[in-house]
């Protein structure tokens, strides 16, 4: 298993935690760990198997994350990922892999996510053409506050 594969599992755990409204600091810890692992110059698989380097010597990797990396290298899976995924509808992780769609992009699990647009956009609410013309006039150069006064 290569570093990007290990990092992907940590990213998935972060996504699953975010969907389940876990502590944002915990989510960030998994995202940071994924970035660290992805960018690490040596294959972590070799380090774990050789036992020559303590993974906690890597910046941002503590005891808990080091243990999880070791689990991934030895078993090919992260038990926490399986546990979190079992609490969600089947296929949700596949949806999260679609570019542009992530845990904060909309309604997941029947609840709107923080920051997702609620309800239809203005085009669906019947914005009148007259309103559009008013906005266009307001946005022209020289329009707005003080536009009726002559320039000095």
Image (cartoon, rainbow, N blue to C red):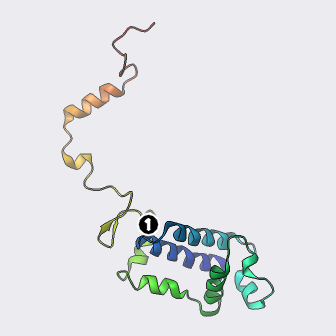
Query: Measuring 44% from the left and 69% from the top, which residue is drawn there?
Result: 98
In the image: residue 28, left or right of residue 93: right
What percent of the width, then of the height, locates residue 5? 60, 79
Query: Which quarter shows the N terminus?
Result: bottom right
**Front-lying residue, 48 or 1:** 48
- Label 1 environment density (alpha carbons within 10 Å; few <14, some 14–19, many ≥20): some
- Which residue bears the numbered disc 1? 102
What percent of the width, then of the height, locates residue 8? 56, 76
Q: Is residue 81 above or below residue 122?
A: below
In the image: residue 87, left or right of residue 11: left
Query: Measuring 18% from the left and 44% from the top, which residue is drawn there?
Result: 126
What percent of the width, then of the height, locates residue 12? 51, 76
**Residue lying at the far bottom of the rendered structure:** 75
**Front-lying residue, 146 or 95:** 146
Query: Measuring 40% from the left and 22% from the top, which residue is drawn there?
Result: 141
**Residue lying at the far right of the rendered structure:** 52
Q: Is residue 67 above or below residue 105?
A: below
Q: Quadrant of residue 44?
A: bottom right
Query: Measuring 45% from the left and 75% from the top, which residue is drawn there?
Result: 16
Which element type, helix, strand or loop, lies under badge 1?
A: loop
Q: Quadrant of residue 148?
A: top left
**Front-lying residue, 148 or 21:** 21
């Amino acid at each position: 298993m290569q570093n990007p594969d290990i990092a992907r599992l940590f990213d998935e755990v972060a996504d699953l935690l975010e969907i389940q409204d876990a502590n944002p600091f915990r989510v960030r810890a998994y995202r940071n760990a994924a970035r660290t692992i992805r960018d690490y110059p040596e294959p972590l698989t070799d380090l774990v198997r050789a036992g020559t380097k303590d993974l906690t010597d890597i910046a941002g990797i503590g005891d808990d994350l080091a243990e999880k990396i070791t689990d991934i290298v030895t078993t090919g899976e992260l038990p926490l990922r399986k546990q979190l995924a079992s609490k969600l509808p089947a296929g949700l992780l596949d949806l999260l892999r679609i570019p542009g769609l992530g845990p904060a992009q909309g309604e997941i699990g029947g609840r709107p996510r923080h920051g997702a647009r609620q309800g239809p956009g203005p085009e669906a609410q019947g914005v009148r053409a007259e309103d559009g013309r008013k906005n266009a006039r307001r946005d022209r150069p020289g329009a707005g506050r003080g536009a009726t006064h002559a320039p000095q």
